[in-house]
Image: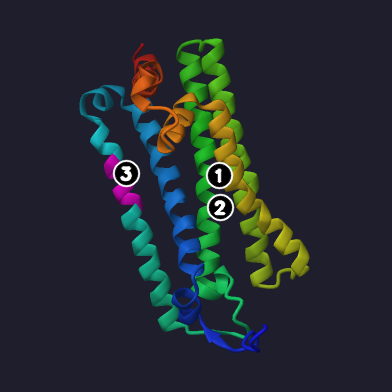
Amino acid sequence: MYKGQYFIEVTDMQCLFGTPWALLIFISVQFPAFINILIALERLVALHLPGWYRRRWKDRHRVYLISISLILTLAMLMLAITFNLIHPTKSPTRICVFANSIGTVYATVDHAAISLVYVLCFIVLAVVFKKSNRIRSPSKDELYRQHMILAITGMSVVMVSFPRVILILDMWKAPSFDGLFVGATYCLYATHSALSIVIYTLFRPDFRSRLLSLFGLQSCTSTPAIQSRVQVNMPNLVKMSMQ
């Protein structure tokens, strides 16, 4: 605005690759969503195919999940670029919000899919915990952990899915919301990332240990009990399912 270049028309492709934030926002939105859905699928496999999971599932498979999430993110980026090339649109300003970077059509599909992913993850977790608790009564600590995970996932539904539904309605003017309301609603999404780090740091000893180790404040190897608990967490669920 200071240079008088704010009210200049830009294309979606210029927004996506000509700004320092649009591409980063795209990746930071897609990648965690794919990670969440693949982890939820892993939990379903562990619950319904416990024998196969114990025999076949190794630590390297979690690396595969991360790799698959990265590949899917890149594939979605290619799809967004394709949409921009087929249906090129222009924005009246250089503000370049997320929808301007990938086009209204793709943004609608993206917002709807990401919203659905978080809802499905919450449902899957609730079903897994309910079934495992029916097979074997959980301890007080385990029940607390389950409630905490469900609360975090439920918070994700409220702070990620709800703002995206508002954005979809606003993009198609059905109805059109006040800009201040849309901005405040979208702040929930940004707040979600910050709150998740705080919550995991406070209530997950394994996460806190690894986070501190990144800053050289605590070594992961100095907390074998925590590592052991993390490593056997899923196998314990498998054993419960087999009994």
Q: Range of the magenta residues?
A: 63-69
In the image, taking residue 38 as reference, residue 87 lies left or right, namely right
Q: Verify whether residue 126 appears in magenta.
A: no
> In which quadrant will I find the N terminus?
bottom right
- C-alpha distance separating marks 1 and 3: 20 Å
Question: Mark 2 is on which residue type?
Answer: Ser
* Badge 2 element: helix
Position in image of residue 239 (x %, y %): 34, 15
The main secondary structure of the magenta stretch is helix
Tell me the distance, in whole angstroms, between the alpha carbons under discs 2 and 1.
6 Å
- The Cα–Cα distance between marks 2 and 3, rounded to whole angstroms, is 20 Å
Q: Which mark is residue 65?
A: 3
Disc 3 secondary structure class? helix
Mark toward the start of the polypeptide (1 vs 3): 3
Closer to the camera: disc 2 or disc 3? 3
Amino acid type of the residue tagged 1 in the rendering: Val
Q: Quadrant of residue 197?
A: top right
Q: Residue at x 73, y 58 (%)?
A: 184
**65 magenta-colored:** yes
Q: Name the residue located 48 percent from the left edge and 22 percent from the top edge.
A: 131
Q: Nearer the viewer, residue 24 or 235?
A: 24
Placement of 179 over or under 142, stated as above or below = below
Residue 115 has which mark?
A: 2
Q: Please tell me whether residue 239 is drawn above or below residue 26 in the rendered image.
A: above
Residue 177 visible in image: no
Q: Nearer the viewer, residue 117 or 189?
A: 189
